[in-house]
Structure formats: C-alpha cells, structure tokens
Image (cartoon, helix red, strand yellow):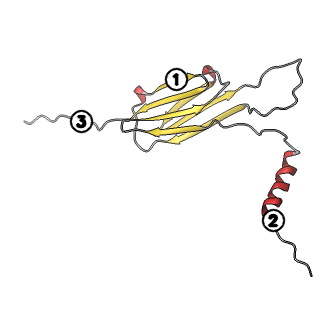
C-alpha cells in the first residue's frame, strides 16, 4: 500500500482556482493604512489613489475613527481591457483609538493620493477650584 503525501497548500490553491472561476479578477480593494501615535496626537495615513475628495467620509464616534469612501471604475466605452488589476468600489476602515481625541481639532488632508488624518489627543481636563 502506497501512502500519498498530503499537501494542504496544494489543496488550498486548488480551491482558490475553483472560486476564481466564479469571480475572476480582484474582489475589491482596501486601502493600506498606517496609524502613528505620538505624545500629542494620532496620525492616520491611507493610500487612496484615484479617490476624489468628495468620495471620502471621515467619522469619529465613541472613540472609533471610521474612514469610508469609493474609488470609481473608469468609464471607458470604446476601449477593450486586456487586464484589470486595480481594484475599485467602496471601502470602510474603522480604528479604535485607545485615548480620547479632541473632535473639534481633527484635520484631514488628501494630497497626491494620500489621505492624512491628524487627531490631537484630548488633554486632561484641568479645573481650577476656588477656595472659600
């Protein structure tokens, strides 16, 4: 009796190939993000090439920063694509910020396909107490 060596990677690749027959090409896209914390703020940087400023929404709720938007498909009526690799469609990314931020001082900038959101941390509330 001969034993066949089981190769799980080969099996997974076969499953992937079968699934790709139903939906060839990229299934969508998710912009890559860096989230940097400094002593005073969080800085989120997202690569969103081809996304227009008016197609991006940023929301802060309960300490969660959500970035959503859409990269639209090119409208080309008279050309024939030979390959489509750049994803398009809608995306949503949500990040829990560990420290409260000041929502009135958050700024966002979209330049050269890079979205930068700066969220200043809320300082500890200092309340002066009068002595009577």
SS category of the residue bearing label 2: loop
Report the residue marked by disc 2. 7
Q: Position of residue 77 (x, y in %)?
A: 87, 18
Residue at disc 1, secondary structure: strand
Name which of mark 1 and mark 2 comes first in the sequence. Answer: 2
Position of residue 13 relative to residue 50, above or below, is: below
- Say which quadrant the N terminus sits in: bottom right
**Image side of residue 20 versus residue 95, left or right:** right
- The mark that comes first in sequence, 3 or 2, is 2
Front in this rendered view, residue 48 or 104: 48
Determine which quarter of the picture holds residue 106.
Answer: top left
Q: Nearer the viewer, mark 1 or mark 2?
A: 2
Of tags 3 and 2, which is closer to the observer?
A: 2
Tell me where residue 130 appears, x and y as whole percent: 12, 34
Q: Residues within 10 Å of mark 3 (few under 14, many from 20)?
A: few
- Residue that numbered label 3 is attached to: 126
Element marked by disc 3: loop
């Amino acid at each position: 009796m001969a034993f066949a060596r089981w190769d799980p990677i080969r099996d997974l690749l076969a499953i992937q190939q079968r699934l790709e027959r139903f939906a060839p090409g990229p299934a969508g896209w998710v912009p890559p993000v860096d989230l940097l914390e400094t002593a005073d703020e969080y800085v989120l940087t997202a690569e969103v090439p081809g996304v227009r400023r008016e197609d991006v929404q940023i929301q802060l709720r309960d300490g969660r920063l959500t970035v959503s938007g859409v990269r639209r498909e090119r409208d080309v009526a008279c050309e024939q694509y030979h390959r489509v690799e750049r994803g398009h469609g809608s995306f949503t990314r949500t990040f829990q910020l560990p420290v409260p931020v000041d929502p009135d001082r958050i700024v966002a900038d979209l330049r050269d396909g890079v979205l930068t959101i700066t969220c200043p941390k809320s300082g500890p509330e200092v309340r002066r107490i009068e002595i009577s």
